[in-house]
Structure formats: structure tokens, C-alpha cells
Image: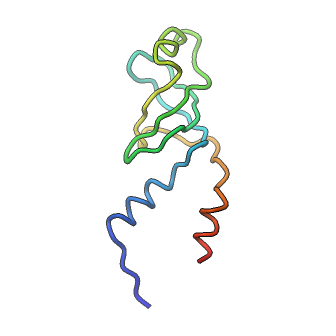
């Protein structure tokens, strides 16, 4: 049986690499001088909205100004801990 892979499928597979709840390490950028740790709140096409959970004390004023949120590129982060996969996604994979 032959299966066709579409660009939409490839994009979905790329995006499914990250999930809401993943804990990640992101590099310094903008006003932040040191790398920071955060939790994924939303997954975009090529970026992630992250709640900053741990950061250098010197970056605290910038983090406060950013409301403890940052948008980071997917290709610049390292996942420290994956979030649990939702049961619905597991059921879809079994079909």
C-alpha cells in the first residue's frame, strides 16, 4: 500500500515535535543577556510562545518588562523535558 506525504503532513510532523507544556532551554536574545528556561504555551509554525520560568537575576528587569513571556525560534531551543502526550493524540496514532 502506497501512502502519499503532503507538505501539510510534513509541517504537522515538524510542528508535532513540540507540545504545549514542554520545558525548554532557550538562548539569550533581545534584552536578555543569558539563556533562560521556559514552558511552551503555544506552538506556531516556526516559533514557540514560552513562559519564562527560570532566568539569570541580571535579566530579571527585562523578563518583568516582557511579562515573563518570549517568542523563540524552534531551531534555537533545546527541549529539557517533554510534556505528556495527550490521550487523544495516542488514540489517533493507533488508528
Instruction: Say which residue appears at 55% left-offset and 29% top-offset.
Output: 51
Q: Residue at x 57, y 16 (%)?
A: 56
In the rendered view, would you say 45 is above or below 2?
above
Q: Position of residue 15 (x, y in %)?
A: 45, 53
Q: Give the quadrant of the C terminus.
A: bottom right
Q: Is residue 24 above or below residue 31?
A: below
Relative to 52, say whether 79 is above or below.
Answer: below
- Where residue 20 sits, quadrant-wise, is top right
Q: Please state, as top left, top right, bottom left or bottom right, where the N terminus lies in the image.
A: bottom left
Task: Residue at the far bottom: name it.
Answer: 1
Q: Is residue 55 above or below residue 81?
A: above
Seen from this angle, which residue lies furthest front? 88
Q: Between residue 5 and residue 86, name the one nearer to us.
A: 86
Model colouring: rainbow
Is residue 32 shown left or right of residue 37? left
Left or right, 2 with respect to 23, comes to left
Exactly how many numbered labels are in the figure? 0
To which quarter of the image does residue 92 belong?
Answer: bottom right
Q: Residue at x 51, y 33 (%)?
A: 50
Q: Position of residue 46 (x, y in %)?
A: 37, 45
Residue 49: percent from left, percent from top = 47, 35
Residue 85 shown left or right of residue 71 in the figure: right
x and y percentages locating residue 25 in the rendered image: 55, 34
Which one is nearer the viewer's eye here, 30 or 51?
A: 51
Amino acid at each position: 500500500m502506497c501512502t502519499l506525504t503532503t507538505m501539510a503532513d510534513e509541517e504537522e510532523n515538524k510542528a508535532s515535535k513540540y507540545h504545549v507544556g514542554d520545558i525548554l532551554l532557550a538562548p539569550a536574545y533581545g534584552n536578555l543577556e543569558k539563556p533562560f528556561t521556559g514552558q511552551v504555551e503555544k506552538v506556531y509554525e516556526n516559533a514557540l510562545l514560552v513562559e519564562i520560568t527560570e532566568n539569570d537575576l541580571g535579566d530579571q528587569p527585562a523578563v518583568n518588562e516582557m511579562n515573563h513571556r518570549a517568542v523563540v525560534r524552534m531551531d534555537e531551543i533545546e527541549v529539557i523535558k517533554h510534556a505528556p502526550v495527550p490521550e487523544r493524540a495516542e488514540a489517533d496514532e493507533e488508528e
